Amino acid sequence: MNVGLILVAAGQGTRLGAGIPKALVRIPDEPEGQALVAHALHHAADTAGLTHVVVVAPPGPPLQQVTDALHDARQHADVAVQVVPGGAERRASVAAGLAALPPDVGVVLVHDAARAFAPPAVFDRVVAAVRSGHAAVVPALPVTDTIKAVEGADGVEVVTGTPDRSSLRAVQTPQGFLRETLQHAHDHASGDGGHTDDAGLVEAAGGHVAVVPGDPRAMKVTTPHDLALATSWVTGSGPAPAGPALVALSGLPGVGKTSVAREVCRRLGAAHLRVDTVEQGLVRGGMAEDDLGAQGYAATFAVAADQLRVGLGVVADMVNAVPEVRHAWEELAREHRVRLVRVDLVCADERTHRERVQQRAGDISGHRLPTWDDVRARAWAPWPSAELTIDTGRTCVADAAALIEEACR
């Protein structure tokens, strides 16, 4: 089923206080900065199966301004993009976008331009869930704060209950639907009904909504503080982590570990420990390559401990496939009382992964790069306790590094 995206960008952004429609706010606030709607389109453009995007913009002069701003976004030749005027409230705007989608679109994503930095992996999770048989799907994060139900007025409220937060989720976008499910929900909606998302309309129409994992970067830019955080993601100018962190990258050769590691080190001022470099140093020192075994990893652990001991963060760049090695990193973090950020790097598109492996050029003298057959024969499984899993086939180096940087905070 072809996928269509309704990108809702018709909000005025009053709470942001920018004096212009929120979708047109530039991040960063510089002439070369992209409008929020352009960032949103850029991150959504890689969604698997996406063929058509309808951007719903404020009517009047802002409509052309949104159209102009989209020229800054990375365009895909096989994805059609059109801009249509929105309505007085959200439901009317989504309905306008739905009417503009061509009839061959069977899966519809509804996404807020204000959630401009939702990673491509979230879009793919939602689409996959719809295609697997769920008619309505939302991404969401567990609620970490204690929630109170209250009632009252005049500035004094009374707590009436404390819901169990383990069953609560903070819902994000993109939300995905079978087209007929979303159309049915809109056709049977009466007024706005107080619904703040399309999943609420589906629930009101008697439908069931499934939940998949969301992402912290899919936050909604609503306040000046949100805008400052989003700007830090784009520019890499966010606050430094509170103390050193140990970032343990894990993934097969060719997924982009070294590129991501170098960018994270640049952002954090951390030490880059690359096991390939350590191993080649041992070989040049006289150790036979066949005798390396675990020696390269052991030497890397020793160097990492020295860096942590003097207060430097560390980014460990290696396959990190076996449980013993992963446990060793966890023990090292506990020993030095530093934050451990475990990151699985994958490239889900096998063709892209193979091309990367075959086209790699070595940058370590004497190091033999693995072939594609070597990589396929290498045992690797996801790290069960990983804080992050990043698909480098759909997430650029800068965005991957920003996710890791945020986790280090």
Image (spheres, rainbow, N blue to C red):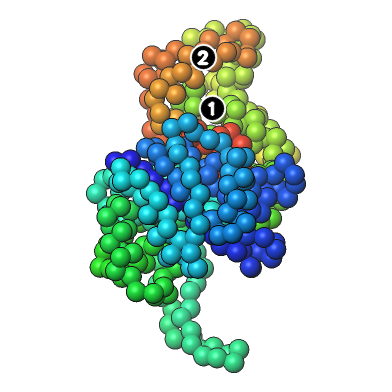
* Few, some or many residues within 10 Å of mark 1 (<14, 14–19, 20+): many
Most foreground residue, 15 or 398: 15
The residue wearing badge 1 is 256
Q: Residue at x 28, y 57 (%)?
A: 181
Residue 368 rendering spot, x and y as whole percentages: 53, 10
Image quarter of the N terminus: top left
Q: Residue at x 59, y 92 (%)?
A: 154
Q: Quadrant of residue 32?
A: top right
Most foreground residue, 336 or 339: 339
* Few, some or many residues within 10 Å of mark 2 (<14, 14–19, 20+): few
Q: Quadrant of residue 314?
A: top right
Residue 131 rendering spot, x and y as whole percentages: 28, 45
Q: Amino acid at mark 1?
A: Gly
Residue 206 rendering spot, x and y as whole percentages: 25, 68
Residue 113 rendering spot, x and y as whole percentages: 54, 53
Mark toward the start of the polypeptide (1 vs 2): 1
Q: Is residue 81 visible?
A: yes
Of labels 1 and 2, the one closer to you: 2
The residue wearing badge 2 is 359
Q: Secondary structure at mark 2?
A: helix
- Looking at the image, is 259 positioned above or below residue 285? below
Q: Is residue 132 left or right of residue 260?
A: left
Q: Amino acid at mark 2?
A: Gln
Q: Residue at x 38, y 54 (%)?
A: 98
Mark 1 to mark 2 CA distance (whole Å): 12 Å
- Looking at the image, is 221 positioned above or below residue 232? below
Most foreground residue, 321 or 93: 93
